[in-house]
Image: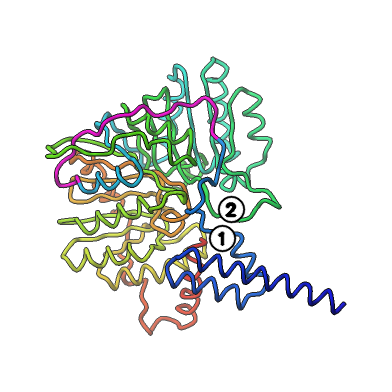
Amino acid sequence: MDYARWIWLILYGTLVVSTMVTVLMDNRQPAKTLAWLLVLTFLPIVGLLLYVFFGHNHRKKQRIYHRRLPGTLTLTPIRAEQLPAHHSELAQQFANQGKSMPYPTGNIEIYTSGYAFFPALMEAFSKARHSIVLSTYIIDDDPLGRLIADTLADQAARGIDVRLLYDDVGCWKVRNKFFKSMSRRGIHVEAFMPVHFPALTGKINYRNHRKLCVIDGETAFVGGMNIAKRYVKTWRDTHMRVSGPIAKAIEAVIAAPQDEDVLKHIDTTLPRPLPQGALTQFVTSSPLSPWQDIMQGYVRILLEAKHYVYMESPYFMPTEPIIVAMRSAVLAGIDVRLMVPRHSDAILVEWASTSYLAQAIEAGVQVYFYQDGFNHSKLLVSDDTLCTCGSTNIDFRSFENNFEANLFFYDSETAMRMKQVFLDDMQHCTLANEHVSRHPGRPFGRRLWESITRLLSPLL
């Protein structure tokens, strides 16, 4: 018995030490490195399991997910269009980081409810001539999900090439027979990075959070809405419909969400000087990219704003660069406003985000609580000339771990429309400053618990 115990201790010690060496060699931020070393030291077995599931640095790996949807399109090289001079640096940044090229802005529709979005989506399905490619984090087996499945199956029966990519973790509660039924009816169904024991490991932490759809390579939908009836009944969200050449770029990303090489053949040198133009960039981020593309874009927008930056996010657990950029913008006299739901759909997230909201308020950010249901919208608008909408939350998971996608618009008309969406939402808000504070007068136990749950922010 003593021999077995010593053998176990030696094996476990060797595994922990080798894991610590791996953590050190990743060269992360010192605080993160130290945190993982402490977890591995003081949480026997549990700490090792936490690292296996959540600690791997996949940005150094060439692939997380190896499979593509067969038969989808590859992107045709397109030279960059010209951008307004006051946004050229941001556009060049996206082009250099993720090969995200600008395209002429086509027709745009903005949907702020499931009542408007889902009928428009199904109408677009019905007009498809040859292909429908859909990528979603969640498609529920509920009345709306079944209606979408039936519509797609009807189109597949007409000979339309219909493809669905769903996230395996996002759809954990959905029974397999729902997807098998779609497959039997002619829909090409693929699960993004299936997570099954014993192959669970760190894959559970890196999910495809994008909500994208492209019809015939000509019309695309991008935004925050999953396919679930709650988006029709109680949730407020924002989705957009765009048309034109940019739809091809979006389709290529759906085809290969794991393949960061898909856009590398595009010339990313933007011409100078850059005259005025109404243009759009489709920007993605993923744990495979060496840079946190969308997060760094948000930082640049905050630091370059001249008048205001308005943001909506269902979750607010920002990385340090975002907090610093928000504080810097406020100190420069910029009107920075943040809108979040009064109550989250996950209590741990609500507790963890409170300390960040207090930090933003102390920095001078005007924080608003949305009261009319749960606001799942992810948008940003700045200076009446720039706006973005997509799947990216202002939190660690979206910026660092998930596969995300946003549209960035460089034109006043679209920015003003998005600004009006924000102002309309403000009619259902109360100022959060009175409710969120780190003032000593608040109950000590509450403040302590919020600080403890804040430690879980990268995992929530």
- Looking at the image, is 282 positioned above or below residue 183? below
Earlier in the chain: of badge 1 and badge 2, it is: 1
Which residue is identified by label 1? 54
Residue under the point 40% across and 50% down: 392
Mark 2 belongs to which amino acid? Ile
- Looking at the image, is 139 positioned above or below residue 37? above
Q: Residue 353 appears at what percent x and percent y?
A: 43, 66
Residue under the point 56% across and 68% down: 21
Q: Residue 161 appears at what percent x and percent y?
A: 52, 21
Alpha carbon distance from label 1 to label 2? 8 Å
Mark 1 belongs to which amino acid? Phe
Q: Is residue 69 magenta?
A: yes
Residue 299 visible (yes or no): yes
Q: Does residue 354 appear to the left or right of 101 in the view shown? A: right
Residue 420 visible (yes or no): no
Q: Residue 262 appears at what percent x and percent y?
A: 42, 35
Which residue is identified by label 2? 204
Its colouring scheme is rainbow
Q: Residues within 10 Å of mark 2 (few under 14, many from 20)?
A: some
Give the magenta-colored segment's residue range.
Answer: 68-88
